[in-house]
Image (cartoon, coloured by chain):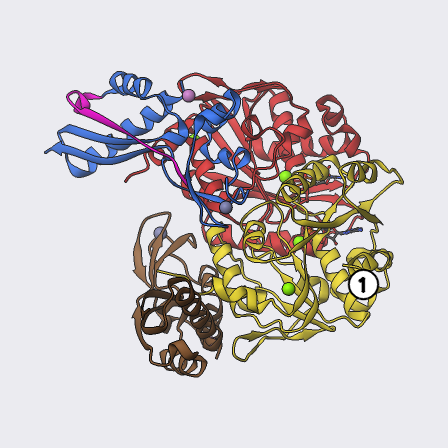
Chain colours: A blue, B brown, C red, D yellow
Amino acid sequence: MHEWALAEAVISTVSQIAEKEGFKQIIEVKIKVGELQQVELEILEYALSQLKTEKLEKTKFTMEKTKAKLKCRVCNHEWFFNRKKLSEKTAEAIHFVPEIVHTYIQCPKCGSPDFDIQEGRGVWLESIKGVK
Amino acid sequence: MHEWALAEAVISTVSQIAEKEGFKQIIEVKIKVGELQQVELEILEYALSQLKTEKLEKTKFTMEKTKAKLKCRVCNHEWFFNRKKLSEKTAEAIHFVPEIVHTYIQCPKCGSPDFDIQEGRGVWLESIKGVK
Amino acid sequence: MIDPRISIIDSRLKKVNNIIAVSSGKGGVGKSLVASTLALTLAKRDYKVGLFDLDFTSPSTHLILGIRETWPKEEKGIVPPEVYGLKYMSIIYYSGNKPSPLRGTEISNALVELLAITRWENLDFLVIDMPPGIGDATLDLLRLVKDIKFLIVTTSSRLAFETVKKLAILLKKLEIKIIGVIENMKMDDSDFIKDQIEEFGLSFLGKIPFDNRIEKVIGNVDMLLATVFAKKIRDIAPHLEKL
Amino acid sequence: MIDPRISIIDSRLKKVNNIIAVSSGKGGVGKSLVASTLALTLAKRDYKVGLFDLDFTSPSTHLILGIRETWPKEEKGIVPPEVYGLKYMSIIYYSGNKPSPLRGTEISNALVELLAITRWENLDFLVIDMPPGIGDATLDLLRLVKDIKFLIVTTSSRLAFETVKKLAILLKKLEIKIIGVIENMKMDDSDFIKDQIEEFGLSFLGKIPFDNRIEKVIGNVDMLLATVFAKKIRDIAPHLEKL
Ligand SMILES: Nc1ncnc2c1ncn2[C@@H]1O[C@H](COP(=O)(O)OP(=O)(O)O)[C@@H](O)[C@H]1O
Ligand SMILES: Nc1ncnc2c1ncn2[C@@H]1O[C@H](COP(=O)(O)OP(=O)(O)O)[C@@H](O)[C@H]1O
Ligand SMILES: [Mg+2]
Ligand SMILES: [Mg+2]
Ligand SMILES: [Mg+2]
Ligand SMILES: [Mg+2]
Ligand code: NI
Ligand code: NI
Ligand SMILES: [Zn+2]
Ligand SMILES: [Zn+2]
């Protein structure tokens, strides 16, 4: 359940932004969760609900999963990350440190480990709405 | 006059694309030249005219300079590269290997050499128009 | 899109009193051996100590310590397991013995991730074993970790020392604390490096002799701590206790 | 936006017969000393040889060769100057002795630039001195340079060899030619590394003894070529002439 740590990061960032923008209440926070990291949305949601501060009492957290798109830097081939092909242990390693994908996955076309995670890595804040 | 080498790269790339797209003639090539590298447009233009292949006989090369925008990774400060502040030798080093700017320039706000060249580095092909 | 991880790093390290990057610019000067032995030495003196291997493409400290079959706990983040009295964190938990061909952006991203999710909690010292070069890992620590202090390792060779000078110039310019410089694998008694270091305004922390029996103790902590190498590190440790 | 540099690299290297990356994964094993001495040795045998220092944040070969006051010519690109019979290229022409704190993306970009504008012309051998680790420089060479061959350097230490194994596994998987492995700074006569290398299906090219007088010849090519180190490299050179 290291989703908790990521939720703390979300709350801390949102609070900082609220401070900076002078928001009294945060209305909505849109979060994108990349599939590569296999974060469990329910756990993330639960953690967020537990970590809520005053300004975040009424906040609606929306979460959207993004597919993990990989692109080979050698042959330009693009493909999607497929968790099902991996062992439990490998999937877990990628869950903690998504870059470790370079240790376990190669370009299906040319075999290179030199690819770019173009989309779908980790947790991102897409937008934050608040009232002043 | 290492602009010649860059012109060769442009011609080689344009020719490759013409081949791939099945262009018989290239009508227009738009080139962006970043200020950081201080490429001399006249020399680049001259080199291109000398290196023209058959398919490129009637090509119009348009060139646009882009200001070099730097952004500090530590404090997020953004600023523009100013060649005039540099010695002849330093400017020349950056002319050959633009990344060397990290050796000679620091963020004017926080002093860090850890900044991003956001725009205005090197020679880029913006678009290529041709007829089949 | 905003990366939420950056803002939490500070609070993850809040209860760490001293964060010490064992660094050099040059590879193969003994950074990993110094970092490991120093962390063990401080732990023996009853400090709470963490060791974080940041050399993601060629990690070594797990070999030096002889670590096997430990794994971090997952508990509201990652809790580094305790090995030989150290809270120990390395990418090898995730990469195993397999190659991890990582570009700089990936090293940077993995580093941010680990800083954001690792719960070091209370530590007197967090010793960081740095990769060679002045690249993403070094620049990210400078960017993300407040009050980071550098412990620099060199050998007597000009090839190492010229690189170390570059690192020192950079850190000085950025007004980063340099604890001092260790001259490792010393073969003679010359004061050449010491003099240059002091002229440069840095503390010279000591000379560690070249010891060709060191290889035999790789992987055995008790034997490592019985070497001359470890004795010299014990002599240097008080410089850190004073921080 | 298309980067035009990539497409010209191939033709810049067309007249180079053998491109040899002296590599290791591990730092401080002697890559730079091997690369420099090997390049000099091949040049002495009347081959046309280039030496390209790709360790951008801690370049060393200019110190080993004792290079000063040379500068590439600008002639439809950059023409590397000839020093001691070698066409010699290094970032120090541009960075001088100053620190160059470069992230991986910047190393990659500078590497592409230099490959795109440097006119090596006819060469029998281009020897490339690699940085430690498996990072941007290694991945870019694999991406951009056809027919690149690797010469791997290790020491007898497990700390070096474990990293070297990772590099070798990676290269083998990618079906990249590995010329062989050199065991440097050898202190005893054991065949441990040799046996493991051969078991792994690689050529073992030879052992180079540890020689504590090497430091005195840094910067002096004639003296360097008179060492046991250079003699061993001469014994290894035929492996390259057969390529
Ligand atoms: N004082 C010393 N005497 C002999 N060998 C040493 C000494 N210090 C380090 N070594 C050896 O030198 C090599 C490089 O050390 P390491 O700690 O891996 O350096 P780095 O982390 O800087 O690359 C290893 O094989 C190590 O065992
Ligand atoms: N055979 C050897 N005997 C003694 N010292 C050596 C030997 N080979 C290399 N060295 C020394 O070891 C250090 C590391 O060598 P270097 O070529 O810089 O390694 P790398 O390029 O792998 O970092 C240098 O100080 C060098 O002079
Ligand atoms: Mg603190
Ligand atoms: Mg190390
Ligand atoms: Mg060729
Ligand atoms: Mg080197
Ligand atoms: Ni988890
Ligand atoms: Ni020029
Ligand atoms: Zn591919
Ligand atoms: Zn700044």
- Above or below for B63 versus B108: below
Tell me the quarter of the image containing the C terminus of chain D.
bottom right
When the figure is inspected, residue C62 is found, relative to residue D235, above or below; the finding is above
Q: Is residue A57 magenta?
A: yes
Q: Quadrant of residue A78?
A: top left
Q: Nearer the viewer, residue C82 or A91?
A: A91
The amino acid beneath tag 1 is: Leu
- Circle 1 crowding by C-alpha within 10 Å: few under 14, some 14–19, many from 20: many
**Residue at the farthest left position:** A132
Rendering coords of residue D66 (x, y %): 71, 67
Disc 1 residue: CB within 8 Å of ligand 2: no
Q: C43 or C197: nearer the eye?
A: C43
The boundaries of the magenta stretch are: A53-70
Residue C114 place in picture, x, y as percent = 46, 31
Asked whether residue C177 is in view, the answer is no
Which structural element holds mark 1? helix
- Ligand 7 quarter of the rendering: top left
Residue linked to disc 1: D224
Instruction: Answer above or below: position of D50 versus B118.
Output: below
Residue A44 image point, x, y percent: 31, 21
Camera-side residue: B42 or B58? B58
Would you say D45 lies left or right of D86 here? Answer: right
